[in-house]
Image (spheres, grey):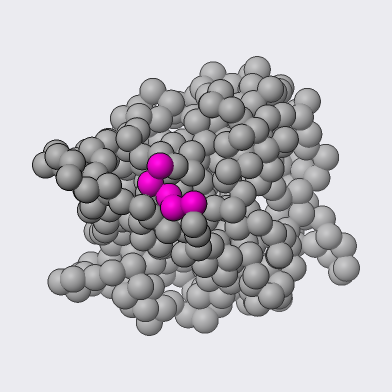
Amino acid sequence: MTAVPPRAVPRPEELPGRVTLARMRELAHGRLDPLTIEYLETGAADQRTVLANERDFGRHRIASHVLRDVSAVSTVTEMLGHAFASPILVAPTGSHALFHPEGEKATARGAADAGCGYVMSGYSTTDPDDLEVDTSSMWLQVNVPPVRAVLDRIVERAGWHAALVVTVDTPVVGARESQTWDGLTLPPGLGFPLLDGLELRPEAGRGIYRTGLDASFGLDDLARIVEESSVPVVVKGIVRGDDARAAVDAGASAVIVSNHGGRNLDSGLSTVRALPGVVEGVAGRVPILLDGGIRRGTDVLIALALGASAVLVGRPILWGLTVAGSSGVRAVLDILGRELAMAMALCGVNTVIDIDTDLLSTDG
């Protein structure tokens, strides 16, 4: 029998007076069992991609402007017809009920309180209809299943939200040797409502395939989803300019530069290193978002300077959720948003659209 982490239990919803993301991570680890920490923090094989996602932001240097009026700085960002308080969105991550008793309800509430966008995972332990917040600006994500009826149901349900995010970088999962839990076998009473009717099993024996993932999904299938969807389709999992261009040609309204948090292909490109090539491939036709490695407001600024319109944050959201539910989620988003505003003021820019490559030093 596959070992599964226990369900989250009620705890005081309290945050320390002054908390950083690093401190939030430390507090979260103090409240989680080892299996859940492995699931949350580890990636594939030797963790090279996981580490590179964070490390490679530090390889960029910011050349700040001075002597500019920065008495009014705004991080407000418009994305696919909706305005958000900042260009920082909650990335799609699964099984939130393992981190807090309210699960995705708390995550959605925290994102709404912060005025930020929320991309709800297809592997959520909460039904979108039960979120108790306005979901009209929320995006719904799916790892493409091989069962057409399940996929069509999710495409239809996405019509109640602002966008459908299709993850395309997981035809199979990577060598998650450090993750003892298979990520699918949930404790009693929990499930994945959006995937109801889909058989979910890890690969058997030495096989590489999972029953819940469509390894045959291609450009024609993406074009069909775009045609059938009543909302914009965003493609997540792009690290190459040619793939980004092909996705846009197939009808994608935006693309997300992502390597699945380093959980699939090890030794892959970090997202910040992949971003310039995707920007070149898209050539301004659609917005580009970056997912992976964001830990500081300066990371957000660097991503925007390299051509991203927004970023997504995954693991830090789960740290905040673990520590203080919706308040913790909001705290993570507020910290990053405040740090971004500080960085903008220190760089002499007033709005996110003023951030460009001029702010990055060419000397490395």
Residue 134 screen position, x and y as percent: 31, 34
Extent of the magenta region: 358-362
Q: At x 44% / y 53%, what residue is drawn?
A: 361
**Is residue 346 toward the left or the right of residue 353 in the image?**
left
- Extreme-left residue of the structure: 71
**Is residue 144 toward the left or the right of residue 214 in the image?**
left
285 and 207: which is toward the camera: 285
Residue 162 screen position, x and y as percent: 44, 28
7 and 63: which is toward the camera: 63
Q: At x 80% / y 45%, what residue is drawn?
A: 215
Residue 271 included in the magenta stretch of the image = no
Magenta part, dominant SS:
loop
Residue 22 visible, this angle: yes
Image position of 153 with respect to 333: above or below: above
Q: In which quarter of the image is residue 226?
A: top right
Residue 197 screen position, x and y as percent: 67, 43
